[in-house]
Image (spheres, rainbow, N blue to C red):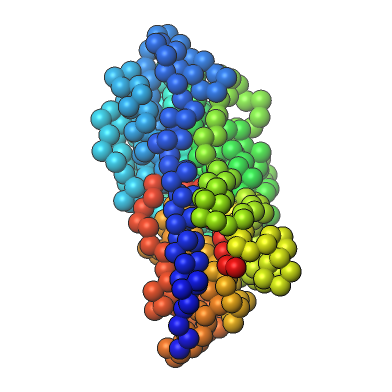
Amino acid sequence: MEKETPGLIKLRRDALAIFQSALEAVDPEEAVRRHLRIEGETLSLEERRYDLGACERILVVGAGKAVAPMAKALEDMLGDRIDSGVLVVKDGHGLPLKKIRVREASHPVPDERGVSGTLEILKLLESAGPRDLVLCLISGGGSALLIAPAEGVSLPDKQATTRSLLACGATIHEINTIRKHLSRAKGGQLVRAAHPAGVLSLILSDVVGDDLDVIGSGPTVPDRSSFQDTMDIFKRYEIWDSIPAPVRERVAQGVKGAQPETPKPGDPAFDGCAQVLVGSCLRALTAAAESAERWGYRSLILSSKVEGEAREVAKAFAAIGKEVLSSQHPLKPPACILTGGETTVTLQGDGRGGRNQEFVLAGALALDGTDRVVVLAGGTDGTDGPTDAAGALADGLTIRKAKALGMDPHAFLKRSDSYHFFKLLDDLIITGPTRTNVMDVYMLLVGE
């Protein structure tokens, strides 16, 4: 088996350090502190001003992987001004808070705990009056955690539908369009529940394009999608006939106008409501680029909006690394090429993995035998698919090392088993819960 050179060992170490810098830059607690100011009785959020003295109650609600640290920042800043609140977070992502109740639940497939926590949120919002201010915290993961099935649809129906969507390769935009039309909380419906109270939303983006009506399935913003869009997505992926009958019935009735649509732009429920984006993938990539330059690399961010099938995007990304080696374009080595976004995986076997691990396995195959290149992909939330890994890293020797251990890399990729491939090589990235979520970071490091 070929041994890693000191130069390759350094590249791998630097890649992990740069990824860590990206995570630190999107810390949710600091994101809230950067945007929110309290001066006397005035709350300032960018150009918006709120008179706290005129508020009868301040309520805090939220859902997502990152909302517990966001809420901690609010408690530190607002103290006893907060009357009460409820959050629903992923298992292991909670924090001890003083005024705000934290409920943990399952992600990405919802469970009864998520339903119970969401019903608590709806009950609190329905008690809000015209002099109350609701601070709503939304981050990635909110779609699966803020779960209140629409009338006629059960939790098992939603669970089965979610599993079908995750397996077929649907994008997060498509999945969330469907979630909004099977829910009593998503797609602007939290604002409808809180009306006539004012609602101020602080949002940490985990979706390509930072579309506010997609993040967490847009519980506090007008919904631009429709029941017809929902049916079109099911049929596009050829899963319409396999989803639960109550879901088909609700969507079909909605297309005919027999079910109420989600609130749209212009709905009076949104009067007095505002949304502020406090963090995004681009901020993580910018921090990674700055970190890489401190480590001596020329850096370039290609895009924060990458989508597509993980294994196909990885091939194109690996080709850029080869181009840097052969022609010194688009950068001269040592170079750090960065992209971000969220790819998808169409499951092809009974293996275990996630989009980042599959991305790196496909990238390793494309880079096999290539000198001086490391590829890394990691989820900023610390969880890649149904695994305890955030992602993985590989280099031009990865495939050779695997074969020397009797492993067939193509077979692992074919059965969607990237997790066990990298676990055997000790190349998984394990961060534990990061309590943030701004999509994924993809990185190429090319040495001199």
Disc count in the image?
0
Q: Position of residue 334 (x, y in %)?
A: 60, 62
Q: Position of residue 162 (x, y in %)?
A: 50, 57
Q: Nearer the viewer, residue 214 or 208?
A: 208
- Residue 239 in view, yes or no: no
* x 39%, y 46%: residue: 435
Q: Is residue 336 above or below residue 275?
A: below
Q: Is residue 246 above or below residue 211?
A: below
- Indicate left or right for 437 with 82 as reference: right
Q: Position of residue 190 (x, y in %)?
A: 49, 32
- Residue 391 in view, yes or no: yes
Q: Residue furthest top?
A: 54
Q: Is residue 295 above or below residue 40?
A: below
Q: Nearer the viewer, residue 125 or 403?
A: 403
* x 64%, y 32%: residue: 264
Q: Is residue 124 above or below residue 50?
A: below
Q: Nearer the viewer, residue 15 or 342?
A: 15
Snapshot quadrant of residue 103 = top left
* x 45%, y 21%: residue: 37
The quarter of the rendered structure image containing the N terminus is bottom left
- Indicate left or right for 129 with 371 as reference: left
Snapshot quadrant of residue 302 = bottom right
The quarter of the rendered structure image containing the C terminus is bottom right
Q: Position of residue 344 (x, y in %)?
A: 58, 62
Q: Nearer the viewer, residue 126 or 202?
A: 202
* x 51%, y 43%: residue: 216
